[in-house]
Image (cartoon, grey):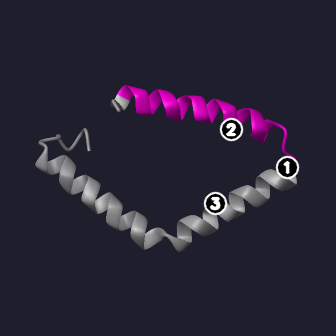
Amino acid sequence: MTIETVIKDMALAARRAAGSLARLSSEQKNAALIRIAEKIVEDAESIRAENRRDLEAARENGLSAAMI
């Protein structure tokens, strides 16, 4: 799978999700945002570890600081 295919698939999924989200009430949207925030806090260390790995891989592959 190419990066172009991945990005295109993500964009199409986002478009479908936007349509679904538009039909939700403010209360439902707020509840979803709260759950997302809770999950980010819950997974924060794992997210940081993955970010560290990504940054290291970027450096190893010669990306400039501006690109990182």
Picture quarter with the C terminus? top left
Sequence-wise first label, 1 or 2: 2
Residue located 75% across and 32% down the image: 19
Question: Magenta part mainly helix, strand or loop?
Answer: helix
Q: Please indicate whether residue 27 sits to the left or right of residue 38 in the image.
A: right
Residue in the foreground of this view, choosing between 50 and 67? 50
For the residue marked with disc 2, what is the amino acid?
Ala
For the residue marked with disc 1, what is the amino acid?
Ser
Residue located 33% across and 67% down the image: 49
Residue 51 is covered by the magenta coloring: no
Sequence-wise first label, 3 or 2: 2
Furthest-front residue in this view: 1
Decide: is 25 above or below 33: above
Q: Which span is picked out in magenta?
A: 4-25
Which of the 4 image quadrants contains residue 6?
top left
Which of the 4 image quadrants contains residue 22?
top right
Mark 1 lies on a secondary structure that is helix
Residue located 83% across and 54% down the image: 28
The residue singled out by tag 3 in the image is 36
Alpha carbon distance from label 3 to label 2: 15 Å
Packing grade of label 1 (10 A; few <14, some 14-19, many >=20) is few
Kindly identify which numbered label has been placed on residue 17. 2
Q: Please indicate whether residue 2 sits to the left or right of residue 63 in the image.
A: right
Alpha carbon distance from label 1 to label 3: 15 Å
The residue singled out by tag 1 in the image is 26
Decide: is 24 above or below 53: above
Picture quarter with the N terminus? top left
